[in-house]
Amino acid sequence: MLQVKYILDNKEKVIEGLKKRNLDSDPLIQEIIELNIKRKDRISKVEILRAEGNKMSKAIGDLFKKGKNEEANEAKSKVQAIKGEQKSLEDGLHEIENKFTDLLYHIPNVPHETVPTGKLEEDNVEIFREGDIPNLHESAKPHWDIVKEKDIIDFETGVKIAGAGFPIYKGKGARLQRALINFFLDEADNSGYHEVIPPLLINEASGIGTGQLPDKEGQMYHTVADDLYLIPTAEVPVTNIYRDVILSDDELPKKHTAYTPCFRREAGSYGKDVRGLNRLHQFDKVEIVQVVHPDNSYAVLDEMVDHVKGLVRKLGLPFRILRLCGGDLGFTAALTFDFEVYSTAQDRWLEVSSVSNFETYQSNRLKLRFRQGKDKPQLAHTLNGSALALPRIMAALIENNQNEKGEVLIPEVLQKYTGFDKM
RNA sequence: GGUGAGGUGGCAGAGCGGUUUAAUGUACCAGUCUUGAAAACUGGCGUAGGGUGACCUACCGGGGGUUCGAAUCCCUCCCUCACCGCCA
């Protein structure tokens, strides 16, 4: 969430910035400012009373020790009166503070100055494009037909076992999946990301830390008996490694990569959009996460974008990078670049990666700080990106690399992982 | 799942209603000494909110309660450890 001090010092900037999200935050910000005044006023009143009470209580102890019981009892009733007043002020304070933090939780991050205005996907700005879109032969098919013919992904049996959106990868399909995971992990390792295998279930505090909670619990699977959530992305457990942590500046940056399955409840839209591998409830992803010094975070964002670029390039997929507009920007992000690969047989772009800088939005919730020399701790910046999400990469590879003989060719970089060069 | 023991500063560890403003040790930082280091000694050493400042306030797993006063007593939730059971 945003820092209160930042909101107070940059009121206009915050309101202007949030307009890019098509959000009229003026009344909300105003309410926060007013509540903050009330809050501070109440705190100082409570603290004055408390200081007085503390002092008198101490004196009572001394009086009893000296045997002046009468005086002590007299003082007791005085303190009792003070405490009564204090209690009702404190109750009010609790109420104010609950409302205050609740409001803060509901304000999204302020978009970076380079975020374009816009409401829909179409308003995202393409900033980069690379690779030739192949001309497919007449008999080219979408991936859902190909995988069925070759029996490498079985959607129907997945439906029986779990439901729609839980495919079974089989034989060479499973092997290709595994190859992609290992390729992505090796590439991340080469770029200095330290691999972790995190828990796939997270508690409420972790969900709040990275911004999935409150309010967005509907997007996650929830295990009722134990009150845990299945991770929607490795971002959540990996970033939460640093919840309530104060790092020293020479420990920055922290770079992590993790392969995990991801679970999303999101009830997709319909038809072509959700067919085959386009949208799943369970999918595999390799994530990269960084915790960095605030001065570097935008340079690091570029570095992460370059890393993802390298991956798609090596796979030989035509791709483009979009700068997300305010309307399409995630709740917690300040700036996001989406990667899309071109799926020839479907004749459309498929999102395969989202690389974002959250600035201090997550670290403020996480209490993720670092200390520069002997200075007071300050909030670090967090970033993350998919590098990459598997299913749509798989879909694009299968569609773009099909030849007239009905074979699907495996990109060279993957062959040492798959052990075969075509399917 | 059962039984028992616990959760105190970076770590170790005392305190179990009122000189706790949380002892002590250790780690760390600075200084003295030293050619330098070690040792010894001296001082400093948590987070957050408020005040120009001396200072004030909160925090001993979380929340609530008893009391003039709670790390200490009570309730509740969470977590850790040990043993038993079950199990990959």
Image (cartoon, grey):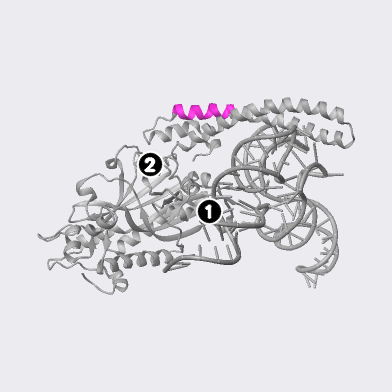
Q: Is residue A397 above or below residue A226?
A: below
Chain assignment, label 2: A
Please provide percent x and percent y for residue A88.
Answer: 63, 26
Q: Quadrant of residue A108?
A: top left
Please provide percent x and percent y for residue A380.
Answer: 53, 49
Q: Nearer the viewer, residue A419 or A50?
A: A50
* Residue A29 falls left or right of residue A179: right
* Residue A231 falls left or right of residue A121: right
Judge whether residue A141 is colored magenta: no
Q: Main secondary structure of the magenta part?
A: helix
Kind of residue sitting beneath label 2 = Val
* Residue A340 falls left or right of residue A288: left
**Residue under the image location 47 percent in, 38 percent down:** A105
Q: Quadrant of the C terminus of chain A?
A: bottom left
Q: Is residue A252 above or below residue A406?
A: above
Q: Which residue is mark 1?
A: A242
Range shown magenta: A26-38
- Other-residue count near label 2 (Cα within 10 Å), few / some / many at <14 / 14–19 / ≥20: many
Q: Which residue is mark 2?
A: A115
Chain assignment, label 1: A
- Inspect this view and state whether residue A300 appears: no
Per the rendering, the mark at residue A228 is none
- Other-residue count near label 1 (Cα within 10 Å), few / some / many at <14 / 14–19 / ≥20: some
Q: Nearer the viewer, residue A277 or A80?
A: A80
- Inspect this view and state whether residue A187 appears: yes
Kind of residue sitting beneath label 1 = Tyr
Query: How many callouts does the rendering have?
Result: 2
